[in-house]
Amino acid sequence: GEIKVCSARFAELTPDLFPKTNDLDSVFARIEETGKEVVRTDELVLPEGKITLRSRHFALLDTQRRTIGYVGIYDDLTALANTARKAKDMENWLQDVIRSSSDWVWSTDRNFNLVFVSSRISEVLEVPTQSLTGRYFLSLGSFDHDDPISTATRADMDKYAPFRNRVFLMTDH
């Protein structure tokens, strides 16, 4: 096939997207074989950095529904792919911190319902993590009122401030 009309950017990327001359022809052949559009995701490493593109390729038909050409529409998903990679990296980092921490780790929503509970808490309580998620945090126990640091906890909670190293007394469940 011969490219008749394309953007300047596509012309620049064509050698990277379709390094072999028959790569683009194989996309066209798949369209002809299946009668359906072909969707591709390509990651290219260019001098300016890595980019991620998603493309949709389909047949251009005349009024008698005969193929007269092919169309490819490209979306630049680089920002989305980078965000997903960063989120995965952050999740992996958080899991590493949790695994290496001897402390219990949890997170609550604005109403102090548990939205995350570390596996360490689940193990010690012998309760599945899923059954703890959604529960009101203080339904599990209370902070030690005799501990000088713990007495400031309610004020921290009212300000939605993070806290650590507080004595929390668990009730039997």
Image (spheres, rainbow, N blue to C red):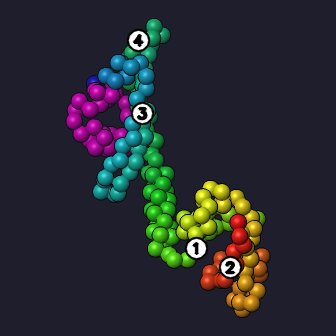
Rounded to the nearest angstrom, the CA distance separating label 2 from label 3 is 53 Å
Q: Residue at x 49, y 57 (%)?
A: 83
Q: Residue at x 73, y 84 (%)?
A: 144
Nearer mark to the viewer, of 2 and 4? 2
Could you tell me if the residues under marks 2 and 1 are in contact, i.e. CB atoms within 8 Å? yes
Which residues lie in the magenta part?
3-28
Q: Is residue 141 left or right of residue 50?
A: right
Q: Residues within 10 Å of mark 4 (few under 14, many from 20)?
A: few
Q: Residue at x 77, y 81 (%)?
A: 155
Nearer mark to the viewer, of 3 and 1? 1
Nearer mark to the viewer, of 2 and 3? 2
Farthest residue, direction top: 64
Rounded to the nearest angstrom, the CA distance separating label 2 from label 1 is 10 Å
Q: Against 72, is 75 above or below?
A: below
Does the stretch in magenta take in 17?
A: yes
Foreground of the two, 118 or 10: 118
Rounded to the nearest angstrom, the CA distance separating label 2 from label 4 is 73 Å
User: Which of the two labelled residues, at mark 2 and mark 1, occupies the earlier sequence position?
Assistant: 1
**Number of numbered tags placed on the structure image:** 4
- Label at residue 66: 4
The image shows residue 147 at horizontal and vertical percentages of 71, 89
- Label at residue 168: 2
Rounded to the nearest angstrom, the CA distance separating label 1 from label 4 is 65 Å
- Label at residue 104: 1
Residue 79 in view, yes or no: no
Rounded to the nearest angstrom, the CA distance separating label 3 from label 4 is 21 Å
Residue at mark 3: 39
Q: Is residue 146 left or right of residue 107?
A: right
User: Which of the two labelled residues, at mark 1 and mark 4, occupies the earlier sequence position?
Assistant: 4
